Amino acid sequence: GAVVSQHPSRVICKSGTSVKIECRSLDFQATTMFWYRQFPKQSLMLMATSNEGSKATYEQGVEKDKFLINHASLTLSTLTVTSAHPEDSSFYICSGTSGGAGTDTQYFGPGTRLTVL
Amino acid sequence: AQSVAQPEDQVNVAEGNPLTVKCTYSVSGNPYLFWYVQYPNRGLQFLLKYITGDNLVKGSYGFEAEFNKSQTSFHLKKPSALVSDSALYFCAVREKGSNYQLIWGAGTKLIIKP
């Protein structure tokens, strides 16, 4: 299956700093990428959908100025958590799809564990 | 409203026994159905999907799922469970024509005991 990588896998930062998470599709072109947040023992919460070269579409309740998403190429999307606070601590997962015939599977990255002190 | 239900928070199965993880959905129109597995502190791995055709879909690691339109279900099954199958399983649905967004179930923790 298609491979998606995320970097870093784990990051610890101080409150007020910004953190950038990279999501790369290694062997396919991801025309659409998704960013999710997952709390312990819970399902995935979709944060935003991004199409290459376009502005991301954020889900209701997700602050677009706090969670900056850039999808500059067909293989790279970044999520920047700006002015992070302890409540932003979570497991962030990205996924990508090549968006072919409308049936394409989402392939997920391994996730990034963010801890804000 | 569109939704996916995984009625069991946890399923316990003895190694070697068959396993079933249940999923029902409520969407308008014909859905695309997916199963993913998540191991601790990892992202999700795709297991299988139903788009059209044969109602019985075979996927990775010996798993299969049966699409039942009348019962709006897509239960995940495996004939003989392995301890290594212990993980968190998510069912997801996408409505045809949507922008690839998935509607997720809450997840079911599968525990296989030796």
Image: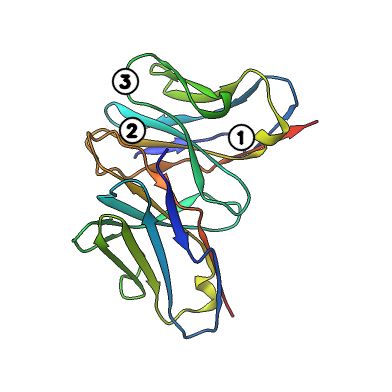
- Place of residue A32 in the rendered image (x, y in percent of width and height, measured from the top left): 27, 50
Disc 1 or disc 3, which is closer to the eye?
3
Given the image, what chain letter belongs to the residue carrying mark 1? B
- Which amino acid does the dot numbered 2 rest on? Val
Disc 1 packing (10 Å; few <14; some 14–19; many ≥20): some
The answer to which of A77 and B75 lies nearer the viewer is A77
The answer to which of B68 and A78 lies nearer the viewer is A78
- Which amino acid does the dot numbered 3 rest on? Thr
Q: How many marks?
A: 3
Q: Quadrant of residue B84?
A: top right
- Label 1 element class: loop
Disc 3 or disc 2, which is closer to the eye?
3
Q: Which residue is mark 2?
A: B27
Q: Taking the image as drawn, is residue A60 in sight?
A: no
Disc 3 packing (10 Å; few <14; some 14–19; many ≥20): few
Could you tell me which quadrant the C terminus of chain A lies in?
Answer: bottom right
Q: Which mark is residue B52?
A: 3
